[in-house]
Amino acid sequence: MATKNFNHRAAVIAGVTGGVISGLVKLGWENILPPRTAARDATNPPQKLLEQVGVPASVTHATYSYSGHDLPAVSYMMHFGFSTTFAVAYSLWARKHPQAKAGSSALFGLGIFGTFHHAILPALGTVPSAKEQPAEEHISEAIGHVLWMWTADWVSATVYDRLTRNK
């Protein structure tokens, strides 16, 4: 059953907040269980996808320096853009269709993982086919997407509730 009245502005703000924080969680998870081999990470999927549409490697591999580390600026922009886009979409969808929150968003996270890592990105030639990816990649990405979306859901629900309390 769809909810007719909810605060769209609060849902978007909550989704952006959840997207940024859950993006940090996913980055942290990938430091614990890296999803790709070092060779495949030399040009990571966000960088390769941009290169496939004509963005030069000089841009896709652009870095910034912090505390003596060169960090991948464009990869982070893509990472947080993806995270925030889907967190906002989920925040709006879950407010409109509360039954969408089944599994505390774990199913949504697994759906995003499967759609992108097993279908879209392999079809575009951005990553190898699912059967050619190592098991470690599937494990890291599946768990990472569940934790990512669970965090986005939890944070966005908390922010939404605070923004709409007593209004």
Image (cartoon, rainbow, N blue to C red):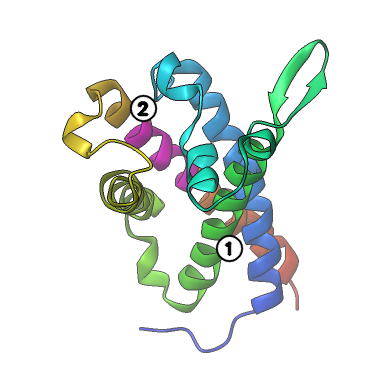
Q: Which residue is mark 2?
A: 140
Q: Is residue 101 left or right of residue 10?
A: left
- Residues in magenta, as a range: 141-150
Mark 1: give few (<14), some (14-19) or many (20+) Cα within 10 Å. many
- Image quarter (top left, top right, bottom left or bottom right) of the N terminus: bottom left
Seen at 70% across and 70% down, the residue is 10
Nearer to the camera, 118 or 84: 118
Whether residue 146 is in magenta: the answer is yes
Residue 156, by quadrant, is bottom right
Place of residue 27 in the rendered image (x, y in percent of width and height, measured from the top left)? 56, 30
Question: In the picture provided, is 114 more to the left or to the right than 80?
Answer: left
What residue occupies the far left of the structure in this picture?
131
Residue 142 in the image: state x and y as whole percent. Answer: 33, 36
Q: Kindly identify the residue that appears in the image at 49 percent across and 63 percent down.
A: 90
Q: Which residue is mark 1?
A: 88
Q: Is residue 132 magenta?
A: no
Say which amino acid is labelled 2: Ser
